[in-house]
Image (cartoon, rainbow, N blue to C red):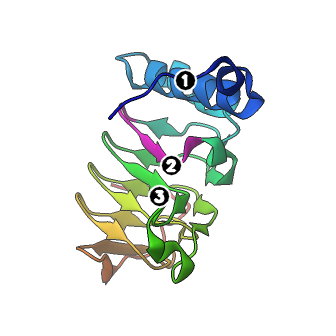
């Protein structure tokens, strides 16, 4: 059953900030350019490196904690990726057994997250790693790895790129 909010709740600074963040996140989900999306996410506190690409419909679970997200240089994040920076059972009695978990998500330089990837709190995805479509990342992914599945596991190591531009 829904209820009306009272004026005290609406004037609450946390409510106003949360509402502001939610509006900006919805704007970023619209079909706007990558530059506009990056600008909005940086304004929300995400640390994003140069030449990063963030596809449409990036979902940040618990957006007031978007400052816990670090995206490295030249990272590519496809459409409909979900970054979970906070997770817990909310008002369930389970919260006494399983407290809310917060954690920084770090995506190191040149990593690629394919469509529909979900990254849980406290995860680091290493440099030059690839995460396959639909994967759920529950553990850190080492650099130069391909990981896929639910839960994601490393299925292949990839070599470092040489400094030479070869085909």
Which badge, 3 or 1, is on the more N-terminal residue?
Answer: 1
Question: Where's the C terminus, which quadrant?
Answer: bottom left
Depth check: 128 or 81 in front?
81
Q: Nearer the viewer, residue 11 or 104?
A: 11
Residue named by callout 1:
5
In the rendered structure, are the residues bearing label 2 and label 3 in contact, judged by CB atoms less than 8 Å apart? yes
**Where is residue 56, by image quadrant?**
top left
The residue that label 2 is drawn on is 75
Q: Horizontally, is 137 left or right of 126 in the view?
A: left
Give the residues in magenta. Answer: 55-63
Q: Residues within 10 Å of mark 1 (few under 14, many from 20)?
A: few
Q: Earlier in the sequence, mark 2 or mark 1?
A: 1
The one of 151 and 95 positioned closer to us in this rendering: 95
In the displayed structure, 108 sits above or below 82; it is below
Is any part of residue 48 visible from this angle?
no
Q: Is residue 38 left or right of residue 79?
A: right
Residue 111 — which label?
A: 3
Looking at the rendered structure, the secondary structure element under dot 2 is: loop
Q: How crowded is the residue under tag 2: few (<14 C-alpha within 10 Å), some, or many (20+)?
A: many
Kindly report the distance in space between the C-alpha atoms of the residues bearing marks 2 and 3: 5 Å
Disc 3 from disc 1: Cα separation: 43 Å
Q: Residue 18: give x, y in percent of width and height.
A: 62, 32
Quadrant of residue 105 within the rendered picture: bottom right
Along the line of sight, which residue is nearer the eye, 62 or 122? 62
């Amino acid at each position: 059953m829904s209820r009306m909010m009272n004026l005290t709740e609406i004037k609450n600074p946390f409510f106003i900030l949360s509402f502001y963040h939610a509006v900006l996140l919805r704007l970023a989900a619209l079909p706007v350019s990558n530059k506009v999306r990056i600008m909005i996410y940086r304004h929300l506190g995400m640390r994003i490196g140069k030449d990063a690409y963030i596809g449409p419909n990036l979902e940040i679970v618990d957006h007031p904690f978007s400052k816990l997200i670090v995206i490295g240089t030249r990272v590519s994040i496809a459409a409909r990726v979900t970054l979970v920076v906070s997770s817990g059972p909310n008002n369930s009695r389970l919260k006494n057994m399983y407290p809310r978990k917060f954690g920084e998500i770090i995506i190191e330089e040149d990593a690629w997250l394919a469509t529909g990837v979900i990254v849980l709190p406290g995860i680091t995805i290493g440099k030059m790693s690839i995460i396959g479509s639909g994967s759920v990342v529950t553990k850190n992914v080492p650099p130069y790895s391909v990981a896929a599945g639910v839960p994601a596991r490393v299925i292949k190591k990839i070599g470092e790129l040489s400094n030479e531009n070869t085909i």
